[in-house]
Amino acid sequence: MPTAAADLQAFEHAARLVLMYGLVPLWLLAGAGDWLCHRLTHIERNAGVRESWLHMLMLAGVGLPLLMVLFLEVNALVIAVVLAALVLHEATAWWDVQYASKRRRIAPVEQHMHSLLEVLPMAAASYVVVMYWGQFLALFGAGSEPARLALAWKPAPLPPGYLAGLFVAVALLAGLPYLEELWRCHRWRKREREAALAQATRALRGDT
């Protein structure tokens, strides 16, 4: 029995390391790559503001459960939020591609970025479910554990150095790039509207 407990502890430790230092960084890099693809295809001139807002929605859909898993004790409630956010993220990703594909070219490299951005959150959610299997089962009234539905801080917080590095990476690879994209799209739309208004004004005045 002690051996089984030690094996379980070793598995949970390994899974936590893969989640922290593998899946999350890969997701950030894929997001930065996707942003670069948008920039190279001049998203502001075609799909524009609406697609950029869809990107912000997907970012929020991953960011909220990520924050919860980082800081809160993972229980049935947190797992439910993670799974609901995953469904929302996948639905928004489908909506995004449906909208963008009719307005700009989505190159193969961007399609690969999309694949990573869809699969990595699924993989991360799967790791969370496996690591806290008892609480996952409790969501459905199964297993031996009662479902814990209260929000509480982690009893053993993650290392401050890791959290600080992660927040810097999130800001540099996700937050700032996609805010820049949204700003760029809004700026282009404003310029187009101003140009259209100026043209209409000249037409009314009979200017050439």
Image (spheres, helix red, strand yellow):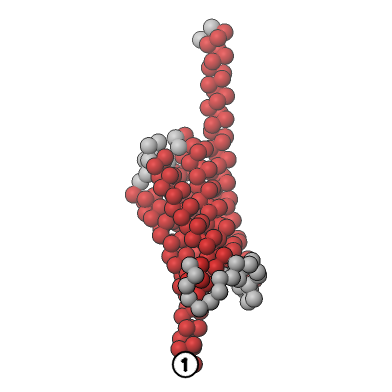
- Kindly identify the amino acid type of the residue bearing the numbered disc 1: Met
Question: Extreme bottom residue here?
Answer: 2
10 Å crowding of disc 1: few (<14), some (14-19), many (20+): few
Label 1's element? loop
Instruction: Compare residues 105 and 123 and report the one nearer the observer.
Output: 123
**Image position, residue 37 (x, y; %):** 43, 47
Q: Tell me which residue sits at (50%, 47%) in the image.
A: 55
**Image position, residue 97 (x, y; %):** 40, 45
Q: Is residue 172 above or below residue 37?
A: below
Numbered label tally:
1
Say whether residue 119 is left or right of residue 154: left
Q: Tell me which residue sits at (47%, 44%) in the image.
A: 39
Question: Extreme left residue here?
Answer: 108
**Image position, residue 179 (x, y; %):** 57, 46
**Image position, residue 84 (x, y; %):** 50, 57
Question: Extreme top residue here?
Answer: 206
- Picture quadrant of residue 195: top right
Say whether residue 70 is visible.
Answer: no
Say whether residue 196 is visible.
Answer: yes
Instruction: Compare residues 202 and 142 and report the one nearer the observer.
Output: 142
- Picture quadrant of residue 184: top right
Q: Tell me which residue sits at (47%, 65%) in the image.
A: 125
Which residue is tagged 1? 1
Q: Is residue 3 above or below residue 33?
A: below
Q: Tell me which residue sits at (53%, 54%) in the image.
A: 61
Q: Is residue 159 above or below residue 91?
A: below
